[in-house]
Image (cartoon, coloured by chain):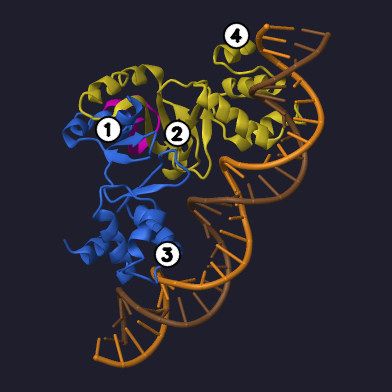
Chain colours: A blue, B yellow, C brown, D orange
Amino acid sequence: MDTAKILREHGLRVTPQRIAIYEALAGTKEHPSVEALYDRLRPRHPGLSLNTIYKTLQAFASAGLVRKLATHEDMHRYDANPEPHTHMVCIECGRVDDLDSKADERLAGIKDLISNDTDYDLVDHALYFYGYCPSCREKRNK
Amino acid sequence: MDTAKILREHGLRVTPQRIAIYEALAGTKEHPSVEALYDRLRPRHPGLSLNTIYKTLQAFASAGLVRKLATHEDMHRYDANPEPHTHMVCIECGRVDDLDSKADERLAGIKDLISNDTDYDLVDHALYFYGYCPSCREKRNK
DNA sequence: TATCAAGAGATAATAATTATCTATTTTCTA
DNA sequence: TAGAAAATAGATAATTATTATCTCTTGATA
């Protein structure tokens, strides 16, 4: 995929930093925080600052290119997939996974289901499940 | 309802501050932040500190008496109803409402629906809808 | 009612996030 | 394709929600 093209299609300027940040986020399933992205990018992009990552992700989120997650940790995480989809959050280690896509499809109609029952004009939704991830579950069972 | 009894049933000590904080939260549908609770309580409880409200709500949440909400604002809000239920968040003014209970009932089975499709041990979930509340919607249509 | 753990309040510390300011770089146009 | 206008990057400093610490007081229980 052509990252520059994706950025332009969202009305965003193209810079080497933005390309690097977007590709780092799109290339992982880990829903990283700003700090985590910074650590990952620093080896190949020594000049890049935390501040730039903050501002860039904010611009991406406003443009609808990425999604900002609120997982009850003391910082936010980001997801290169901006479509509403379901996240699993481990309350032990903080890990965040996407719900298996087939299971998520069954929840796709949620917005339509309730849009008739509210006075709000809906534009988005977010569903989080909290629990113990496989590896933390195992540790607890010992 | 007897607030002292509710607190004791959740393994919490009873103090005048805790009673005041719980009743202030339970007596509103506005899902207030710590700061908002503080402003509301200060007139009748001049001694009460922000710190105490923070610590108290944290204790309440750990005991399963209240729910902490993450609405994408820069602070958290609290809900005296700890059961998983759906929240509507206005992306213009920040207002938070409960979804009409009848509509919410239709979503009650969500957890069971997906618990077979994940390796996580689920203990809780949260569903947020984002959009424009009735009064903000009206302003936008002008 | 005495004891003891836990809570309240004051103060200071943390840490994620944002604001500001200057130099640089894209993008758009002539 | 060069040049101007506008937005970006990066460095530094500032904000602010939230938590830690410490001492005194109070609630719960025997």
Q: Residues within 10 Å of mark 2 (few under 14, many from 20)?
A: few
Q: Where's residue C15, x and y in %?
A: 52, 51
Q: Amino acid at mark 2?
A: Pro
Q: What mark, if any, has residue A52 been given in the picture?
A: 3
Span colored in magenta: A111-131
The residue type indicated by label 3 comes to Thr
- Chain label for disc 2: B
Picture layout, residue A43 above or below residue B37: below
Q: Nearer the viewer, mark 1 or mark 3?
A: 1
Query: Looking at the image, is mark 1 or mark 3 earlier in the sequence?
Result: 3
Element assignment for label 1? helix
Q: Which residue is mark 4?
A: B1
Which amino acid type is shown beneath numbered disc 4? Answer: Met
Query: In the image, is A141 to the left or to the right of B49?
Result: left
Nearer to us in this view, C22 or A64: C22
Q: Is residue B85 magenta?
A: no
Q: Residue at x 49, y 31 (%)?
A: B68
